[in-house]
Image (tube, helix red, strand yellow):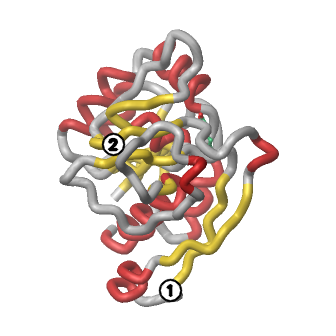
Amino acid sequence: MVVGVLALQGSFNEHIAVLRRLGVKGVEIKKPEQLDNVSSLIIPGGESTTMAKLAEFHKLFPALREFVKMGKPVWGTCAGLIFLADKAVGQKQGGQELVGGLDCTVHRNFFGSQIQSFEADVSVPELASKEGGPETFRGVFIRAPAILEVGPEVEVLADYPVPSNKVLYSSSTVEIQEVCIFSLIIMVNLLAII
Ligand SMILES: NC(=O)CC[C@H](N)C(=O)O
């Protein structure tokens, strides 16, 4: 099994290094046709607006959408998760293109600017009971996005509650799902499968 890592901008090297450590072959994806050679894909963290501009320049969007539509496993970390969301708020003027496929609404910079980045332990009881390991996971929230709402088909494995005065965009959602954690956990699951 070969995992593709979208290698336009951001932390693609780090993701490939982690795959290597786990004994999984990861290859860089920079062109649409390279997606034909991989069975699953990781879209890494970085800066989603820049990444979207580069993806547009390299004509990657149709192939990425097709890959998602085929039902192949795709994991998004932070900016990668923004790519995969069906809807994004807090975008730069003019918006940005999304791959979509994950039924959720994401806020790009929910927690603020770079200096508001932080780390926190997130409780992952379900993962611990299924996969073993600790009950908490150390989450790293780097200019992190948040998932504000999810559709009925989406399974949330962990969430990070925030004070209600931070809930700017959602009237009904009490819990805010933190996407970096969410996507990391999906990766842990994915790697357990492959
Ligand atoms: N760590 C990250 O990937 C941050 C994502 C960033 N907030 C964006 O809009 O792309």
Type of amino acid under label 2 = Cys
Q: Residue at x 56, y 31 (%)?
A: 48
Residue 169 coordinates in the image, percent (x, y): 47, 37
Residue 156 coordinates in the image, percent (x, y): 34, 62
Residue 64 lies in what quarter of the image? top left
Label 2 beta carbon less than 8 Å to ligand 1: no
Q: Residue at x 44, y 25 (%)?
A: 31
Residue 104: give its label: 2
In depth, the one of 121 and 7 nearer the eye is 121
Q: Residue at x 43, y 59 (%)?
A: 175
Q: Residue at x 44, y 31 (%)?
A: 88
Q: Which residue is mark 1?
A: 135
In depth, the one of 95 and 172 nearer the eye is 172
Q: Quadrant of the C terminus?
A: bottom left
| Residues at marks 1 and 2, CA–CA distance in whole angstroms | 26 Å
In depth, the one of 105 and 30 nearer the eye is 105
How many residues crowd around disc 1 within 10 Å: few (fewer than 14), some, or many (20 or more)?
Answer: some
